[in-house]
Image (tube, grey):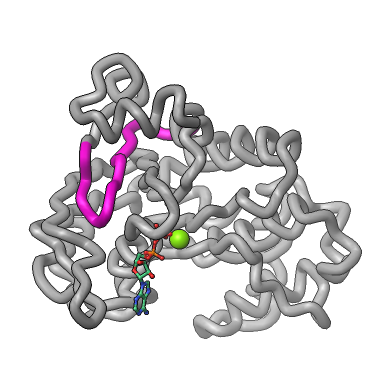
Amino acid sequence: MPPSSDTGQNAANIRLEGVSHRFGQTDVISDVSLDIADGEFVALLGPSGCGKSTLLRILAGLQEQTIGRVLIGERCVDGLPPRTRGVGIVFQNYALFPHMTALANVAYGLEAVGISRAEALVRARDALAGVQMTPFGERKPRALSGGQQQRVALARTLAIGPRILLLDEPLAALDKNLRLDMQLEIRRLQRALRITTVMVTHDQEEAMGMADRIAVLNAGCVEQFDTPEAIYDRPETLFVANFVGAAN
Ligand code: ADP
Ligand code: MG
């Protein structure tokens, strides 16, 4: 998958310093500080409404935090839009153009960043190959399964060659078996590309199975940021113990 030849060197670390965000009178994110290493896979885990998507949008530059700083690759990116930050985002609802083939969807994303049509098609084919979708390039989204559509969405994002991959509940719409396949597939790709990845999920098993480290969020605060093993074996708060334990 392009630009596989140079990904890895491009992976960037992420640092959040005292990030807070307020919507109206409500603190949705409260003083979050996180250091994410380059090439690391981090899950933001927590119940619905705890601020996961808001934190991801702040990382992406889709939302400006009220307080604090965001650094990507040691550079403060506050005020910069997503593309300049080098981030690629995949959402739960794949957001593919329904009237375009899988290949055209991926190529369109490349043309949108100024790549010629001919080059875009070559790179789009490579990107589809990278997610095992070569046989389906000429199909439109409605003729693809949910998992296949999500692969195309992933290819479209990765084809651009981001330094950081942000995933917001990418598998939430898929049924259980497909979800397990896609968990393995995303992790395989992430390791192959060595791309720093932050994935939002409310599913503790998904976070446990995929992430190098998990940040457990509760009402906008990070309760614990640790390896899956440590979160499971040594929860530091009652909330973490309950959320990761029998409550799920
Ligand atoms: P999660 O992704 O963990 O479910 P969100 O980050 O989407 O949570 O939302 C966190 C809180 O912020 C929720 O209470 C939500 O209602 C609120 N919120 C999210 N976006 C906005 C917005 N644009 N304006 C006002 N409140 C918002
Ligand atoms: Mg969300």
Above or below, 71 relative to 182: below
Q: Can residue 120 be seen by looking at this rendering?
A: yes
User: Where residue 158 sits in the image (x, y, percent)?
Assistant: 54, 59
Residue at point 20% right, 51% down? 221
Give the quarter of the image for residue 88: bottom left
**Depth order, front residue of 101/60:** 60
Residue 83 location (% of width, % of height): 38, 75
Q: Which residues are magenta?
A: 210-223
Residue 102, horizontal then vertical, whole percent: 78, 67
Please tell me which residue is depicted at 32% across the width and 80% down the height of the picture: 81
Q: Is residue 241 magenta?
A: no
Q: Quadrant of residue 223?
A: top left
* Type of secondary structure dominating the magenta stretch: strand
Question: Residue at horizontal 34%, vertical 55%?
Answer: 50
For residue 60, side relative to residue 114 (left or right): left
In this rendered view, identify the residue nearer to me: 193 or 72.
72
